[in-house]
Each structure stands twice: as structure tokens, then as C-alpha cells.
Amino acid sequence: MAAMLECFLLAVAVVLVAHAAPAPAPASSRLPLPPAAAGDVYAGSDSDRLALMAFKKLVSGDPSRALASWGDGSTPPCRWRGVSCGVAAGRRRGRVVALDLAGAGIAGEVSPALGNLTHLRRLHLPENRLHGALPWQLGRLGELRHLNLSHNSIAGRIPPPLFSGCRRLKNVLLHGNRLHGELPGELLSSLRRLEVLDLGKNTLTGSIPPDIGNLVNLKLLVLESNNLTGEIPSQIGNLGNLVMLSLSSNQLSGSIPASLGNLSSLTAIAAFSNNFTGSIPPLERLSSLSYLGLASNNLGGTIPSWLGNLSSLTALDLQSNGFVGCIPESLGDLQFLEAISLSDNKLRCRIPDSFGNLHELVELYLDNNELEGSLPISLFNLSSLEMLNIQDNNLTGVFPPDMGDKLPNLQQFLVSKNQFHGLIPPSLCNLSMIQVIQTVDNFLSGTIPQCLGRNQKMLSVVNFDGNQLEATTDADWSFLTSLTNCSNMILIDVSINKLQGVLPKAIGNMSTQLEYFGITNNNITGTIPESIGNLVNLDELDMENNLLMGSLPASLGNLKKLNRLSLSNNNFSGSIPVTLGNLTKLTILLLSTNALSGAIPSTLSNCPLEMVDLSYNNLSGPIPKEPFLISTISSFLYLAHNKLTGNLPSEVGNLKNLDELDLSDNMISGKIPTTIGECQSLQYLNLSGNFIEGTIPPSLEQLRGLLVLDLSQNNLSGTIPRFLGSMTGLSTLNLSSNDFEGEVPKDGIFLNATATSVMGNNDLCGGAPQLKLPKCSNQTKHGLSSKIIIIIIAGSTILFLILFTCFALRLRTKLRRANPKIPLSDEQHMRVSYAQLSKATNSFASENLIGVGSFGAVYKGRIGIADQQMVVAVKVLNLQQAGAYRSFDAECEALRCIRHRNLVKILTVCSGIDFQGSDFKALVFEFLPNGNLDQWLHKHLEEEGEPKVLNLIERLQIAIDVASALEYLHQHKPCPIVHCDLKLSNILLDNDMVAHVGDFGLARFLHQEHNNSSEKSTGWNAIRGTIGYVAPEYGLGNEVSIYGDVYSYGILLLEMFTGKRPTNSEFGEVLTLHEYVETALPDQTTSVIDQGLLNATWNSEGTAQKYHDIEEIRTECIVSILKVGILCSKEIPTDRMQIGDALRELQAIRDRFDTHQL
């Protein structure tokens, strides 16, 4: 659509300028020299020659030697290149009348001396490198008709004398410069003959003056891409000769004036990317209108049916507004229509059958609406169609088997994020012009057509991510062999399907242009072929969460452009290839949860790595210093759960930008190096489960940004340093199972018993009462007695053996994986910057603030993603808040590979710096317009002045949605995910009141061995949830488990149907919401039910007896629901209901009672 618009407007402008511009005098160099008059005509006047030479003098660059003949002494001025002189008898004979040096590439300033060319009629210098101010002396050119200085770098204000003295001007073209200031009044009061005014792509400010209506001869008005504000004056309706109006990309506001409907000569209106409001004004009389572009505004209402009367229309662009309702059937009457974009609105209806009449249609954009129903069969009769984009809707049905035979010119087939099902038609292989196929997040099943790509040389993107496609046999996988014929292929993604079988070796024969190859979250077996090294332009290789095995091929080292290598959660074995050191652009290396062995190759220090995860493997040998020499590592370095030995290298101090370091569950010995204090950005440090000895080094105090410190299960000794209590950002401290002695500090984090663990240190005393340690004697405070020292020395050997045995039997599973690459169906590589988010939210203006949470604020914004404008929710983290960095990484970690209709979709992330140079982190989510559940239950959203509440069936369906999301998370493979902060405000509602669980800032992954464990008291995890929803076992230091989420869900369920928060003051310190409801069931149920449910209207009509019956049914339904809440929120974790059982019980309740329309 954008390309079509640009070509259309350019064509209109060229025609108008050519028509309006005075014909230049014939170039003297092309005329025969009349013998008698040679000296008179071609010598020119002295004043003209001097003016031209003054112009040349200010030229600082002339790469095409356009002015080489100027002033050489042998050529008269009228024969100089670009100069035309008058030849007819009269006062202009021999005088310069035109200067035309378009596209000559000359650099320099525009000389004021040009104002001395008093007979000049045409000054045409576009597409050069002229700079400086526009000289006011040009206002002396009283004969000037045509002024074109477009596409230069001329700056400053437009001088008013320029127009007051050039009253005969017909064309003024200053497009694409750096002019600023307001539109000069002289322009509108003096130039009554003006036909073309093009001031586009400058930085002009102010409003469009009403006097614009005085330019009654104007045919082309271009003010696009400036900073104009205010409304379009209604006087613009006086420009009866106007053919083209371009006001796009400004900050204009208000309604579009109805007077535009009077301009019967208009062929093009381009007013996109402004802030216009209201509805589309009546323009049905503009029978010549060919282009109407009103995209990216705030227009609303319904799309008017009279648009179907604009019989000349070839392009209609209404995307990114707030239009509602249906698409008018009358649009099918626009027989010349070539492009239509209604994307990013709130249209909720079926696609009109009449669209099948648009036989000239080339581009159709209906994405990001709420369209429903199946695709009209007539749509597949549009043989001219090249672009079909219907992504992000609620469309259903199957694709016609013969669709590939009826759309011979289709180039892009974009149907992602709908509810299409059935097979991918094999006729898709007949689309010989196809370039992009994207069916992400649908329910397509069956196999991928084997012929795909066989005769489709232009195919460059194949994205079937997030469906139910299958492959088991070699024949099912043969589509990859066919795709090797596509020499332009840049992306192949079949992630999150049901693919099985052996990965074909054909992947190594793909186009060398391939940049992304993704097969994540399937059950694919086999090995990575050595031929993978042929894909020399590969930027990302994502194969995580499969059943791949064998060694990693050394040929991976040939992928010199590889930026991301993600092979986690497979069964790879053998050593990490040393050839990975050849990947000089590799920033993300994720190899966790495999069976890799051997040493960590030293060659990795050659890679500019930022994120490294080698945890949960069998890597062995002394922990190498090389990973700590990679100064670019900034996000995380995870080497946990391996068999690394030796001392922690002092080179760790090189990682000055590192956020997280996890070396837990290895066999590292020696002391903590003092250089650890040089890791100034460190927020998370986990050295637990090793054999580290000695004391905590004083240099650790330098880590002022540290949030989590876990040194548990080591052999550390000495006293606990008091400076740990003064580290204000520290939110989790685990020093358990060491040999610390003496008094525990009593300040800072040590006052928070739920965030601190010192268990298993037998000689500690004092501290906060919550730690329940023995009081310190004077001797204990000042030193150990000789007897105690002797006992410790005598028992050290036994203690060591006990610790070693425990270590050998213990399998720690606290790995925190972080993976910043969140697959976006249309933009696999896209990120957004701080500048983009700032613009999208109007500099994070307060009017766009939609919520504030524990770690930051959420703003509503409008941003372009994958060439689309969409409304989004931007979660900006407050990095001054303790735990914010951790929350950001946790949310990325949890969202990287999960997808479910009841989970909030993340679109992209931003991790960079703001305009002040401070760290900035944000996540961009889909915008869900109905807010959160807390607002509905406790604040009561208002609509049209009436308080709005959720009825029984709506609440029950929301509860089912949330349970469905939890079941998905808890059954996630290979590691279940625990949300850890389930509450009403984290349940968001879309247009259809479908619930989406959000905010994964505290989420945790569980390793396989913890799946069925509710209490693991041998370890300790700090959990920060929300008071009232946190499972009671977390307060006792137990491990994270899925039972904790079930408890939170039970409390949430009780709150939804009682209307009472778990922290309600009426419960006091003894009673809980669980007990409050349990004691009322079943006889006193009505006393605890939310009165909004009891007072809600019901749909049955009839007698009082019927009313009584319906009330009984309603109460019975609520009792059944509350019983589920009670079972889910039992105090003992193993007594709680499984979330899957709760889901099925609630669905059964809904099926029993929804027929009564409660």
C-alpha cells in the first residue's frame, strides 16, 4: 500500500508541475548560432554574467563538472550548461531567463546574487547538495514563475520578501529541505496565481492559516511530513481547482472539514499519520477521487457506505483508526479499486461477499481487527490479487482446496493469528509468484505439502509456527527438500507444532541466503547434519525443546554471521565444538539441558557473547578462565549443574557489565576471589552447591546493585559480614548450610525472615527474632572458646564427608533460564528502541498510563510492528525498584516459548538506554481493552454512566480461562512453569471478555524431578508474591511448586464470587477468606456471595415461583464453584485439587447451568 501510494502521488505531482511550469527557453547550446546576431544574443549581459559567477563562487563541490564551462573565457554565458537566455526580440533578448541544474550534485550555498537575474523566469535546482539559508534577495525576481529547490539541505525560515516580490510565481517547490518556522502570511496574500505549492518534508510548525483559501488557482498542495498543528481550516473548501492535497505525517487534529466535499476536482487526499478525530466527512461528490488515505489517525464510527459511490477510487487506506461495525458491502462496487487497507481497527463482522467483485484488486489488508466467520469463496476469484493480509482476526474455516489455482499472482499470503483449521491445500504449490507464506498461530493440521517450493523460485518466507502440523515419515519431511529449490529463502519456521521423526539432512542444502531456521518445541529426533555449515548467512538457529541427539557438528563454525544459537532442552552429547570460536558475531549461546561433556572450549572467548547458558549438562574439568575474559557478556552467564572443578578464576572481575552469574551445583573449590567486587552490574549471584571455602570477601560490598545472593551449601566460614545488612537492594539472601559462626546482623535484609536463610550454620546466634536463633553469649560475640575450636577441628573431617555425600545425592534444579528472543510471528529479528516507545506513548505521558505494578508502570501506545500500526501495552520497568532487573529477565524467560489463548501475548522487548543514558527495559504486549479483573470486581468499570458488573456466567467463564492457562503452564514441557503471582490484577480481559493471564515477573521453571514435589525443604527459594494469595508453605522456606499456583487460584476463585479481597479487614488476623467461605457452606452461602451476583437480572420471565427456582439454581451453581475454590486453597499442598481437575469441574458446572442464562 505504501509503495502504491508513493508512486501514485508522485505521478500526480509530476503531471501537475509539468503542466503548470513555464516552458524553459530553448537551451542556447542546442541552437545554431545566427551569424549576424551572435554577439548580441549569446554574449549575454554583464550583470547576468556577474550574478552567475557569484553563484559559482559559493559552490563548494561540483562532482559532475556541471559548471566547468562557466567563466572559462571562451564560452558566452548563454551557452553555459544549465543557462537559457531569451532569443526573441524584446527586452529579454540575450538575458538569462532560466537556470536549470537539476540533479547535478552541486554543493554549496545559494548565492544572493541570483536576485540580480532580473529576467529570470525559471530557477530549477532540485536534487543537489545546497545548504544554508534561502536568500531573501530572490524576492527581486519579479519575472519568476517557477521556483524548485526541492531535495537539498536548505535551512532556516522562508523569507517573507521572497513571496511579496515574486507575485507571478505559479510553482513553489521546496520539498525535502530543513526549513522551519511557520507558513509566511505573504505566501498566502501575495501569490494569487500560485498553482503548485510543495513544502513537504521540512520541519515547519504552527497551523495552516485560514488565508490558504485565497489561493483559488492552487492545483497541488503538499504540506506533508512537517510539524504542523491545529485543525484544517474550513476555507480550504474554496480551492475549487485543487487536484491533490497531501497533509500526511503532521500533528494536525480536530475533525476533517466537510468543505473538502466541495472540491470536485480532487483526485488524491493524503491525510494519514495525524491526530484527526470524528468521522469521515461526506465526500461522496468527489467523483474524480482516485486515492483516499486517512490511515493512522483517531477517526471512529462506522465506515460510511457512500464510499462505494466514489467510482474512480483506486486506493483506499483507512488503517490504524478506531472504526467499528461492519465493512460496507458497497465497497464491492468500486470496480477500479486496486488497494484497500482497513487494518488495525475494531471491525467486527464477516468479510463482505461483494469483495469478490473487485477484479482489479491487487492489495487487500484487513489484519488486526475482530473479523469473524469464514473467508468468502468469491475472494479466491480475484486473479489480480498479490497481497492478502488477514492476520490477527477471529476468522475460521478451512482454505479451499483449489485456492492455489485461482490466485495466480499472489505474492504474500498472511493469515496468522486466526482460527483456521484443516489442511494446508496442496494447490498452494501452484502459486508460482508467491514470496511469503505465514500461517502462525492457527489450528492447521495434517502434513506440510511435499511440493511446497518445488516451482516457487521467489518464495522467501515460510512460517507455519504455532499450529498442529504433523510429520513422522521421511515423506512427510520431504517439503524441506522441495524448499531447497527456493534460492531467495530467508526464513523457515515450523516451531510449536507436532512434528516428529528424523530431521532431514536436506536442511544443509537450503538457500545460502537463509537467515532464520526454527523448529523449536516439537518432538524431532535425529542429528544436526554436518551440511548445516553451508548456510553461511544464517543469523539465528533455533532448535530448542526437541529430542535431537548426537554431537554438535564442527561445521557450525562456518556460520560466520550467526547471532543466536539456541539448542537447549535436547539430548545432544559429546563436547562443545571448538569451532564455535569462529563465530565472531555470536551474541546468544543457549545449550542448556543436554548431555554435553568435556571442557568448555577456550575459543569461546573469540565470540562477542552477551548471553551464555551452558547449564544442566555434564561439562567437566577445571572451570576455565576464558568465559570470564568475554567482556561483552552482559545479561547472564549460566554454568550451573555441571561437574566443573577448581577455583573460581580471578578473571571474573572482567565481567563488569554482567547482570547474572550462576555457577551453582558444580564442584568448585577454593575461595571467592576478591575481584568479584569489580562486577559492578551484578544483580544475581549464585555459587550454591559447591565446595567453596574461606570467608565472604569484603569486596562483595561493592556490588551495590545486587538483588539475589545465594552462597548456600558450601564450606564458607567466619562471621557473616555486617555490610550485607546495608545492601539496600538485596531482596534474597541464602547463606544456609555453611560453617558461619558468631552473631547474625540485625539490620537490612536480616530483618526479613522470608527473604533470608541461615539454616544449617550451627554456630550462629542472635539476629532478628524471626530467625529463631539462640541468643549470643559474651564469649560467642567476641570469639569462640578453645573447647569449641577443638570440637570443630575434630569434627571437620566427618562434616566434610557428610557434606560430600549429601552433595553427590543432591540434584539441584533451580536453573533460571533467560531467553530474550521472543518469537514474533511476523518479525523474527525485530526489536524496538527507547525512542520508538517514547514516541508511541507520547513521551510516556500520564494520559497514556493504564496501570502501576510492583516493578514499573504500563502505558498504552501506538507503534509500528512488522509494517503495521497497532495499539500496544508497554510495561516500563522501574529499575530503581529492587528486583526489577530480575523481574524483566524472569518475564522474558517464561514467555519465550509459551503460547496459549489465555496468556497475554508479548510482541517484543526493549533493553537499552534512555535519552539521559540510563538503563531502560520494557516489554511490549498486546493491548487488552477491557482492563483487568480487579477493576471489574472492585472498582466497577463504567460505561455510559451505568456501573457495569460481571454476571455469573461471565465470571465462571473467566475462571475457566484462567484455569486453562494454569493447566497449560503446569504441563509445559520439558519444564513446568509456576506463575508465582496469580491475582485479579494480573488477569486481563480482551474485547470478547476472554481472560488472559499476564505478569510473569516472578515466574519460575521447575525441573523434572520437582514436578510432583510440593515440599522440598532441603533447599530454599525466596518467593515474592502478593499478600493474601501466596501459598502458606512459601513462608516456611519451601521450594516453588505448582501447588502454590493452585492455592492462589483457589483464593482468586473465592474472591471472584464473594467480592471480598483476601486481605479484607473484616477477617482480622485470625480468619482467612478460605475459612470465611468454608464455614458458610452450604447453609449460609447467600451471606458470603457477592451481592452483585444476587442482584443481577435474569433472562427468564414468568411467575414468582419461576423466580424462586432460578434463584435456587443460581445459588446451587455458586456453591459448586466455591467448593472448588475451597479444595484448591487447602493449607496442605498435597490436599489441594489438581488444576486440571478444577478446570474440568468448572466446565461441568458451566455445562449444567448455562442453559438457564444465569
Image (cartoon, rainbow, N blue to C red):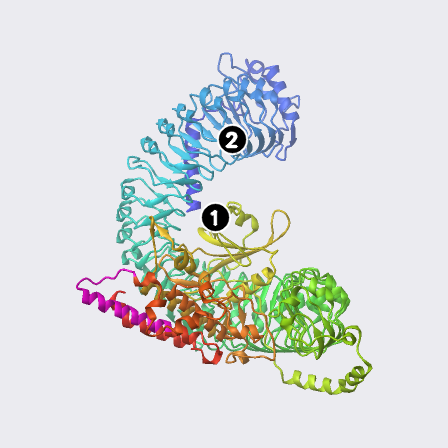
First reached walking from the N terminus: tag 2 or tag 1: 2
Residue 477, placed above or below residue 836: below
Marks 2 and 1: which is nearer the front? Answer: 1
Q: Position of residue 482 (x, y in %)?
A: 45, 68
Main SS of the magenta segment? helix
Residue 663, placed above or below residue 373: below
Residue 280 visible, this orientation: yes
User: Quick check: is 197 in the magenta stretch?
Assistant: no
Residue numbers of the magenta segment: 1095-1122
- Tell me the tag on residue 174: 2
Q: SS for tag 2?
A: loop
Left or right: residue 1055 compared with residue 842: left
Q: Position of residue 563 (x, y in %)?
A: 60, 62
Give the residue pinned by disc 1.
848
Marks 2/1 in contact by CB < 8 Å: the verdict is no
Label 2 environment density (alpha carbons within 10 Å; few <14, some 14–19, many ≥20): many
Q: Position of residue 1054 (x, y in %)?
A: 40, 68
